Every structure is written in C-alpha cells, then in structure tokens.
Image: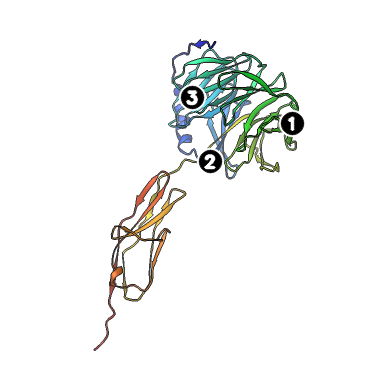
Amino acid sequence: MKTNLTIIQRLPLLALAALLTAASASRADIVYVSNGGNNTIEMFDLATGTDLGAFISTNLACPWGMVFDSTGNLYVANLNWSQIAEFTPAGVGSIFVGSGVDEPTSLVLDSAGNLYVANFEGNTIFKYTPGGVGSVFANSGLDWPTGLAFDSAGNLYAANYLDNNIMKFTPDGAGSVFANTGLSHPECLAFDSTGNLYAANHSGNTIVKYTPGGVGSVFASSGLNQPEGLAFDSEGNLYVANFGGNSIMKFTPGGVGSVFATSGLNQPQFIVIQPRPQLQPTISMNPASTTVFVGNTVTLNVTASGGNLSYQWLFSETNIVGATNATLTISNCCSANAGSYVVTVSNAAGSATSQPAILTVQPLYRRA
C-alpha cells in the first residue's frame, strides 16, 4: 500500500535568482553536469564541448541527479541536504521536496510528469505528482539505489550500488531482477533509442550494454575512471561523467570514445542534455522592390533566422508553385509579372511574412 508523504511548502531560494537568470536565457543544446566536489552545476556547449560556466554555484550540497520537465524546469537532487530543488526557466528557485527523502540520488520523470526519486540511504523510490504529492513507489529489492531510467513501456529500472544488480519495476511497482552479471557498483542508467540499457560501473570502469532481453556486453572500457552519469544526445552519442577523472567522455554509437570536456569539472556525477528550443522565424532583410525591363531576369532575396526554416513566395497573395527557397528568380520578365511579392518563412515555432517587394516591369522603347 502506498504511503502518502507530507511535503513542506515551497520556499524561494532568492540567492539563486540572479545567478540563474542570465544562464537560463542561453539554454540551447547544453550539457548540464552536477559537480559533487564543488557543489555546482556546470554547462557545456553540446556541439563544441566549450565550458559555458556554472549554471548554479550556490545553495547546493553534493548535487546528484538532475532532470528537466516538459516546460523547462530543472529538478536537482541535493544528496547531503536530503532535498529536491526546482528551478524555473526564468531562474526562480524553490524547494520542491524538503522532507521525506533520504540522500536522494537519481531523478527521472514518467510520461505523465510524475517525478521519481531514488533514496540512497532509505533504500526506497519515491513518486511525486507534478503538484508535489508524494508516495512510496517501491521499497523492496533495493540496496543503495543510485540510477533510474524508464523504458518505452513505462517500466522503471533501478541500479543497486551494493547488490550489483539492476531491478525492473512495472508501472504498478512490482519488482524483479533484470540483470545481476557484469556489474560492479553500478551508478547511472540510460536507454538508447532502440531500447538497449546502459549501466555505468563505478568500480569496474566500464559501461555495460544490456539488450531488452537482459543480455549484457561491455560497450566501453577505455578512457573511464569511476564513471557515473550517462546521457544520450539526439544522434545516439553517449556522454559519460568520469567522477574520478574529472572529465566527460563521448562515445559514438559504435563505441568509439573521445574526451568531450575536462575544464570546469570537480567530481562530476550526473549529466542531462537540454535540447535546443525551436525559435520563431525572424526576418532580418526583406526582399527589395526593383524595376526591370521586359525580357530581363530579376532575383528577390530574403534573409531570416530561427532554424529549420521553410519558405513560400506569394505573388498578389497567391502561392507561387515551387517557390520554396530563400531566393526567387523570375526569368524573361513581362508585364504579367509586375506586382507585389512577399515570402512567408516558417518552422515548427511559427511564421513570419516579409514586407512586400514591388516589381515594376517597363517596356523596351524603340526609336521611330
């Protein structure tokens, strides 16, 4: 039977607001790493590995697990304070859970937005609704749980640090052992896009890969020093936090490893990647009005930003078939081409329409 928990009122962490506001505005394709050694959360550019500085550098006590919800709020497990902090995209911090947890480590969200917390010392997994109502999800078969991950069917997997196994819990909380070979103090777990489960062996200095059927094999064993955090990017590359080596390793889907980052790290523990948000198109240069003579060629151009852009040119408010590029070329102009041209630039976030460009076509004059 699930036990309801009392949660303290959310209290604003005003000291964090100024630090978070500037960082949150630039959040796009960023790797977030929790540093247990200096109580910070560091940011790195996903494309280049460049250290972007600390996202949070105060009011943290051995931060471990992190997870973003669908609206961009970041949840952080403060292991030493036994609390869960929440930070809005605007940088406002609050205590989401301040009692009832016991040295929380990993955090994950299910498809309904419920937050699951692994209690390292409490040997339990708690579940919190988006409104903050808590209950015990699992309290059997756990021995220092450190890593949590959901599969596509909604089953929750938990890495047991002391028992050297991985438990599998159905959505209703029924548990069973998923894997108990090839593990040496497993820390974090992560699924790839095809349903394979990866486990970081803290003491074994390896990453083990398990098929959906539980068949395990060593995915990586070089360049690792007490690996903990795991996270996949959209291209299937695996990022690994080297707790002992103060580095982040990057492994291709084929297992080829390289150093992703070394600066700004102090006992890195968990990793989370925040995808690039889609920006609405912005037109910085409108097509220009122009005058040409009959028979000449004219090219209209638009310059826009926003990412993943599509274009549609219109003549007299009617779509021009096939005119779907940033440039529109009209050959052998005649009087029928004269008029108003606009272009609509679109992506998933919205659209923008240019100012009209007026094309004037003049006849050729011949001397009598």
Q: Is residue 228 above or below residue 291?
A: above
**Residue at point 44%, 48% (across, down):** 306
Q: Nearer the viewer, residue 192 or 65?
A: 192
Per the rendering, the mark at residue 29 is 2
State the residue position of label 1: 205
On the rendered structure, is 285 left or right of 252? left
Write down the residue under mark 3. 86
Closest to the observer, 283 or 334: 334
Q: Quadrant for the C terminus, please.
A: bottom left
The disc labelled 1 sits on which kind of residue?
Asn
Q: Give amino acid for label 2.
A: Asp
Task: Answer above or below: position of 83 versus 304.
Answer: above
Q: Earlier in the sequence, mark 2 or mark 3?
A: 2
Query: Do the CB atoms of the residues marked 2 and 3 lie less than 8 Å apart?
Result: no
Q: What type is the residue that disc 3 sits on?
A: Glu
Q: Nearer the viewer, residue 256 or 196?
A: 196
Q: Position of residue 262 (x, y in %)?
A: 65, 37
